[in-house]
Every structure is written in C-alpha cells, then in structure tokens.
Image: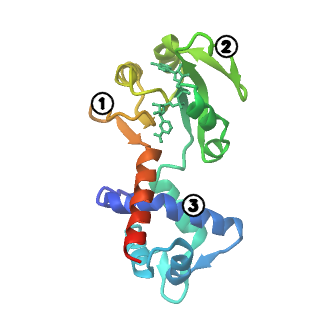
Amino acid sequence: MGNKNISMAVIRRLPKYYRYLGELLEDDVQRISSKELSEIIGFTASQIRQDLNNFGGFGQQGYGYNVEALHAEIGKILGLDKPYNAILIGVGNLGQAITNYSGFRNSGFEIKALFDANPRMIGLKIRDLEILDSDTIEEYIKKHDIDIAIVCIPKNGAQELIDRIVGAGIKGIWNFAPIDLEVPKGIIVENVNLTESLFTLSYLMKETAENK
Ligand SMILES: NC(=O)c1ccc[n+]([C@@H]2O[C@H](COP(=O)([O-])OP(=O)(O)OC[C@H]3O[C@@H](n4cnc5c(N)ncnc54)[C@H](O)[C@@H]3O)[C@@H](O)[C@H]2O)c1
C-alpha cells in the first residue's frame, strides 16, 4: 500500500500507536475500541479514528480494532518489518548511554560498530563492541551493510563527518549533535534534541503557573 498522502502530523503519531498497541498485544488484548484506545493514548477517539482510517478498514463498527493486525500494519508503514544495521559515532557520555540501552536492538535496530576519534578510546569495549578508529569509518560502511549512523559527536566537526559517511553510502542519520546538517536529497536526517524538549517543558510549566 502506498502511503504517500499521509501527513507528517499523522506519521509523528504512528510510533505512539505502535508502542501502545505492542503493549496491548503483550497483555493479550485482541481488540480495542477507539474510545478505549483514547483513554490509554490520550488522543481523542475521533482523532484516533481519523488517523487510523488512513490505513484501511481495521476498525469495524461494534468490534473495534484488531490489535494484532493494526500493530503489524503500522509496523509495516513505519518500516519496522525489517531489521536495520547501525553504527554509532562519538562514544562519549551520550554515545555510551545509547549503546548500553538494549531497547533499540529489541526493536530491530542493531548497533554493529562504534567509532571515535579519540585515540584513548579506540580499542576499549562497550558491551561486546570494540571502539574503532573513526578514520576507518568509510571503509567499514562500504564493507558492511549499514543503514543508519547514530551521530553523538559535538557540533564541531559534525558536518565534515556527515559528508564522509554519506559519501560512503549511509542513507539515514539519527543526529544528536546540536547542528542543522546539510545532506543531499534522498538522505534522511532525524534530529533529536533533549534540550528543546526541556525548553518545551519549561514553557508549559510557565504557562500553567501564569494561568493559575
Ligand atoms: N541531542 C540531544 O538531545 C543531546 C543530549 C546530550 C548531548 N548532546 C550532544 O551530543 C554530543 C556528545 O555529547 P557527550 O556528552 O556524549 O560528549 P562527550 O564529550 O562525552 O563525547 C563526545 C565523543 O565524541 C568523540 N568525537 C568528537 N569529535 C569526533 C569526530 N569528529 N569523530 C568521531 N568521534 C568524535 C569524542 O572523542 C568523544 O568521545 C554533544 O554535541 C552534545 O551537545 C545532544
């Protein structure tokens, strides 16, 4: 099924549906109404019906949604029906935390190799992965089937690194460096910025206090 017309706002909500439906599956829940789903997820029931209508007839009047089918379909739309190989670059505080988190692997994203520019880090191991010299990164990408680069280096040097790994064939970048990267068409960058999220928290707290 082509999903070209699904809006980015819906796409941004899909991971949440996928996660909650996964939890329902673990609890052996086989079907659920939009009203019940609304109580769990927090979106309105009409928002849920509207969102899920994008993907065909999963909801049936008086039956609700088939949890397993909907979970599988959303997984397929998100591209989670295949595994991804990743490398992680910059094995500092953040890089180590990401490497140590097992949840990504359980979701089908496997970190295959770690790279750092600091000679004192090279050769050390995090979990079962040895830290490799980032000078060898292009060679590694070309030899292995790597889909995603997880970028955990500082802003300085990040664009140069991106140019190198994109040149070597990386198609997706999960970027934690606080910089707007420039990439050629067809290369996907997903930025993660915890500080921006913290600023949103600050705003919402301020608003709540002012409206008391
Ligand atoms: N986006 C977020 O939410 C978020 C959260 C925390 C930190 N950060 C950012 O992530 C970056 C890393 O933070 P940290 O606390 O892990 O820093 P850190 O100093 O502990 O680690 C950075 C690591 O990157 C390596 N490195 C630097 N330049 C490199 C290069 N060109 N190639 C390969 N390796 C290189 C360093 O040797 C070091 O090991 C910083 O830019 C920080 O601002 C972002």
What kind of element bears circle 2? loop
What kind of element bears circle 3? helix
Q: Is residue 103 visible?
A: yes
**Residue corresponding to mark 3:** 19
**Residue corresponding to mark 2:** 123
Residue at 44 percent of width and 27 percent of height: 154
Is disc 2 surrounded by few (<14), some (14 to 19) or many (20+) residues within 10 Å? some
Is disc 1 surrounded by few (<14), some (14 to 19) or many (20+) residues within 10 Å? some
Q: Give the numbered dot on residue 183.
A: 1
Residue 54, by quadrant, is: bottom left
Amino acid residing under circle 3: Arg
Amino acid residing under circle 1: Val
Q: Is residue 147 visible?
A: no
How far apart, in angstroms, are the residues tagged by discs 2 and 1?
Answer: 30 Å
Where is 161 relative to 175, above or below?
above
Residue at 35 percent of width and 56 percent of height: 2
Tag in front: 2 or 1: 2
